[in-house]
Image (cartoon, rainbow, N blue to C red):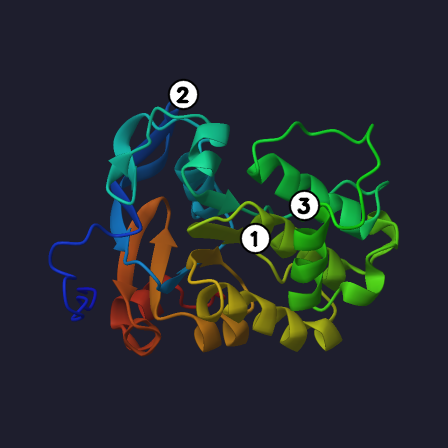
Amino acid sequence: MTAPQPTSAGAATAAPALEVRDLSLRIGGAQILEDISFTVPTGQIVGVIGPNGAGKTTLFNLVSGVMTPTSGTVLLDGRDVTGRSVTQRAVAGLGRTFQTSSIFPALSVEENVRLAAQVAEGRALSLLTFPRRNDRASSRARDLLGEVGLAHRGAHRAGDLPHGDKRKLEIAMLLATNPSVVLLDEPMAGVASGDVAGLTEVIRSLHTDHGCTVLMVEHHMEVLLGLVERVAVLHFGHLLALDTPEAVMADPTVQSAYLGESV
């Protein structure tokens, strides 16, 4: 399968927001990922699917700098970031969420976002100074909490939030760092069914309101297919397919590979 090519003016020369070239990871004698290559054009939402053990989270770990590939290259807006740290990639515009919530549970909801905004401004990560009400980072935090539907929970302890609201908080924290490319690793994991629609709209807003390019792993197929423009299928560490959702779901190779398995 071939992925559809961008047709907008200047697309022929513009670098994609994210590109991986021949990305591989071998641990001991096990080949975890092998020669993964794909691009995510600026402004697109691309989904990654595959059964447990397919290599989805490993791919995210390599792209975000948590792990180092055995071979291959990761490019962000055309710049090689393969040798850069997680922090350096974040400064370059790459943001990520994890399968499990990564918040400061003992702090208030607003303090979580305020700290992220503070770091994005180049200031120290400090809780020792009580922020002024009109402090720029605090104002930014309140604005973002309003965008994700958590304005009414700003003073609440973050650890007490329901799981769906923790996911929204993580996205607000991500937005506070001004990312251009966002990796979402199973954002619906553990989210109650009644919270799925609201969280879906928050994810959509990353694209529509903030112009972020999004690469997301998600097992909730109805959510994923309703958001993404293309789907990448991983199978035993290989990229099996990359195309529109309709083409991927109709592909006999994908159907054969996942006969009896949920993608």
One can see residue 190 in this view = no
Quadrant of the rendered structure where residue 257 is? Answer: bottom left
Above or below residue 243? Residue 54 is: above
Is 163 on the left or on the right of 90, as rendered? right
Residue wearing tag 3: 137
Q: Which SS class for mark 2?
A: loop
Rendered location of residue 76, percent (x, y): 32, 42
Residue at 48% x, 30% y: name it: 86
Numbered mark located on residue 29 in the image: none
Quadrant of the rendered structure where residue 89 is? Answer: top left
**Label 2 Cα neighbours within 10 Å, binned few <14 / some 14-19 / many ≥20:** few
Residue at 35% x, 74% y: name it: 245
Above or below residue 244? Residue 181 is: above
Going by the numbered disc 2, the residue's amino acid type is Gly
Q: Nearer the viewer, residue 189 or 148?
A: 148
**Label 1 Cα neighbours within 10 Å, binned few <14 / some 14-19 / many ≥20:** many
Looking at the image, is mark 2 or mark 3 earlier in the sequence?
A: 2
> Marks 1 and 2, Cα distance to the nearest angstrom?
37 Å
Numbered mark located on residue 175 in the image: 1
Is 58 on the left or on the right of 41, as rendered? right
Residue wearing tag 2: 28
